């Protein structure tokens, strides 16, 4: 795997890890009706993508997917299942980050 591919895999892993953290915070807060929060998260992610592209900000391009994924998870799953989803997102994110460092 070349350096560009490893960077893309690492960005995906970081996004999933951050999405897991966001979903975990929502689960811990106990918000029951999170439709508005889910829409806000998706809008924040889309805005980060646009700003990242326009301003060529690599940090925003690396993490824009996190709030989008978190928003979709928060909207789709029941509040009592969010902690499990947060854990799964974090595990997959860490696995991707590790793979990006060792994949050759």
Image (cartoon, rainbow, N blue to C red):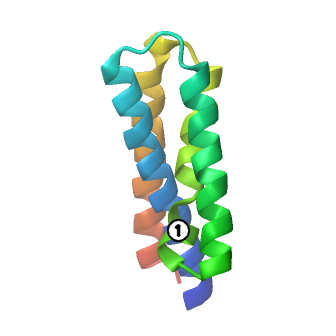
Instruction: Say what secondary structure mark 1 lies in.
Output: helix
Relative side of 63 to 49, left or right: left
**Is 48 drawn above or below residue 59 in the view shown?**
above
Q: Residue 65 in the image: state x and y as whole percent.
A: 59, 54
Q: Residue 35 in the image: state x and y as whole percent.
A: 61, 20
Q: Quadrant of residue 2 in the image?
A: bottom right
Q: Which residue is under mark 1?
A: 60
Q: How many labels, in total?
A: 1
Residue occupying image coordinates x 39% and y 55%:
94
Q: Residue 103 in the image: state x and y as whole percent.
A: 50, 77
Q: Residue furthest bottom?
A: 2
Camera-side residue of 25 and 91? 25
Q: Residue 67 in the image: state x and y as whole percent.
A: 54, 46
Quadrant location, the N terminus: bottom right
Camera-side residue of 24 and 37? 37
**Is 24 drawn above or below residue 79 in the view shown?**
below
Mark 1, Cα crowd under 10 Å, few <14 / some 14-19 / many 20+, is some
Camera-side residue of 44 and 23? 44
Relative side of 22 to 57, left or right: left
Q: Can residue 9 be seen in this snapshot?
A: yes
Q: Can residue 1 be seen in this snapshot?
A: no
Q: Quadrant of residue 9 in the image?
A: bottom right
Relative side of 74 to 39, left or right: left
Residue occupying image coordinates x 60% and y 80%:
55
Residue occupying image coordinates x 53% and y 11%:
33
Relative side of 44 to 92, left or right: right
Residue occupying image coordinates x 31% and y 22%:
28
Q: Residue furthest left?
A: 28
**Is 30 drawn above or below residue 19 in the view shown?**
above
């Amino acid at each position: 795997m070349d350096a560009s591919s490893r960077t893309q895999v690492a960005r995906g892993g970081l996004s999933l890890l951050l999405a897991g953290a966001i979903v975990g915070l929502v689960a811990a807060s106990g918000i029951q009706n999170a439709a508005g929060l889910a829409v806000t998260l998706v809008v924040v992610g889309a805005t980060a993508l646009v700003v990242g592209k326009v301003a060529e900000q690599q940090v925003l391009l690396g993490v824009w997917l996190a709030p989008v994924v978190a928003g979709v998870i928060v909207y789709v799953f029941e509040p009592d299942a969010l902690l499990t989803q947060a854990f799964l997102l974090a595990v997959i994110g860490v696995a991707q980050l590790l793979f990006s460092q060792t994949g050759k």
